[in-house]
Image: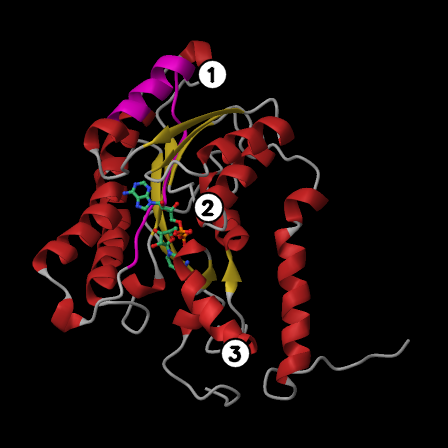
Amino acid sequence: MSYKKLPSASQNQQEFYEITKARIRKIQSHLADSPRGTRLKDKVCVITGVGSMKGIGRAAALLFAHEGAKHLYLIDFDATSLPDLKDTIHKQYPDVKATTLQGDAADEALISGVCARALKEEGRLDVFFANAGIASLAPLESTTADSFMNVMRVNTLSCFLAVKHASAAMKMINASRGKTTSGGSIIMTASVAGLRSGAGTIDYSASKAGVNSIAKTSAYQLQKTNIRVNSICPGLIETGMTTDTFDYARQRGADAKIGQLNPLARFGVAEEIAQAALFLASVTDDSSYVNGQNIAVDGGLSASHPVVPGRWA
Ligand SMILES: NC(=O)c1ccc[n+]([C@@H]2O[C@H](COP(=O)([O-])OP(=O)(O)OC[C@H]3O[C@@H](n4cnc5c(N)ncnc54)[C@H](O)[C@@H]3O)[C@@H](O)[C@H]2O)c1
């Protein structure tokens, strides 16, 4: 048997990048390559921000369907891709009900309404993945009070509304639908930008820090309800939100350098965030004692102070 040492990022950037691309292709083919699971069997879930073809919300919707969710209520402000998502779930997972809704995740009537609808139609709500979000690019000088508040509204208020209305629904007991005690999982997509600086504008970072705070605080507000609240803090993920960055790097032939600041030395893909959401969504055993946490899924980016890549830190 012969062994070959893998190249490190600093040894051979191109070879390392080819290995990275193969790794990402394998991660992205997980659903096609894996048998159906049961981690969300019979569970009723809401996911916001599902409309982007490359987005985290869509990847989560497909993964949740793959894992046997009973009914997915899927929300996006942009309706363009919702029919495709519904069709895809219907064709690939005919046992999973998918209801798509066009609307604003920060609209209280929509969010309270979808939670009430889940109770009315399914008698229970188990998971709310508050994932919708927008990025902002404006530097300090051109960030206005209005643009700041809009980012806070979409990114942070939407999560507050999810916690408020989903938790109320998750407390409802309905023995005829198999729900004999209060319980559920609320997951919010924050960002590493909400942990410390260097990953986004002031308004975006503040909005995500707010989401992280909501996860910690609401877990306490919801004590003894068996409702867990956690946030996920993605690092650099290739989605609709970051398309311009990736396109720009590729045009300049610099794609091998994307994401090299973290110890995995690569960017992430939506499917990897979806897997973290699934772990947190599992209302059986997987994450039953994980509560009030801000979980970084960032290749290790937030583990370190700034360091010269390749040096021991
Ligand atoms: N891509 C990254 O690198 C990254 C990193 C950290 C955090 N995030 C967060 O991940 C989440 C998902 O973003 P993504 O990367 O998949 O981007 P994306 O742009 O591909 O998807 C975001 C989706 O949210 C929808 N949306 C925006 N505002 C909405 C609203 N008010 N109501 C309902 N839907 C709305 C958009 O239409 C879009 O379909 C966001 O909260 C984002 O801030 C992304």
Choose top left, top right, bottom left or bottom right for residue 45.
top left
Frontmost of labels 1 and 3 is 3
Name the foreground residue: 249 vs 199.
249
Magenta span of residues:
112-135
Earlier-in-chain disc, 2 versus 1: 1
Query: Residue 296 placed where, x, y %?
Result: 41, 60
Q: Residue at x 26, y 61 (%)?
A: 136
Q: Is residue 300 visible?
A: no
Q: Helix or strand or loop: what does disc 2 sit on? A: helix
- Name of the residue lying farthest toward the right: 1
| Figure check: 249 above or below 241 | below
Residue under pointer 2: 277
In this picture, residue 133 sits left or right of residue 88: left
Q: Residues within 10 Å of mark 3 (few under 14, many from 20)?
A: some
Amino acid type, callout 3: Lys
What's the amino acid at mark 2?
Ala
Asked whether the residues under the numbered discs 2 and 3 touch, taking CB atoms below 8 Å apart as contact, a structural biologist would say no
Vertical arrangement, residue 141 with respect to residue 222, above or below: below
Q: How many marks?
A: 3
Sequence-earlier tag: 1 or 3: 1
The residue beneath circle 1 is 178
Q: Quadrant of the C terminus?
A: bottom left
Whether label 2 touches label 1, CB < 8 Å: no
Q: Amino acid at mark 1?
A: Gly
Q: CA distance from mark 1 to mark 3?
A: 50 Å
Residue in the image at 41% along x and 86% along y? 307
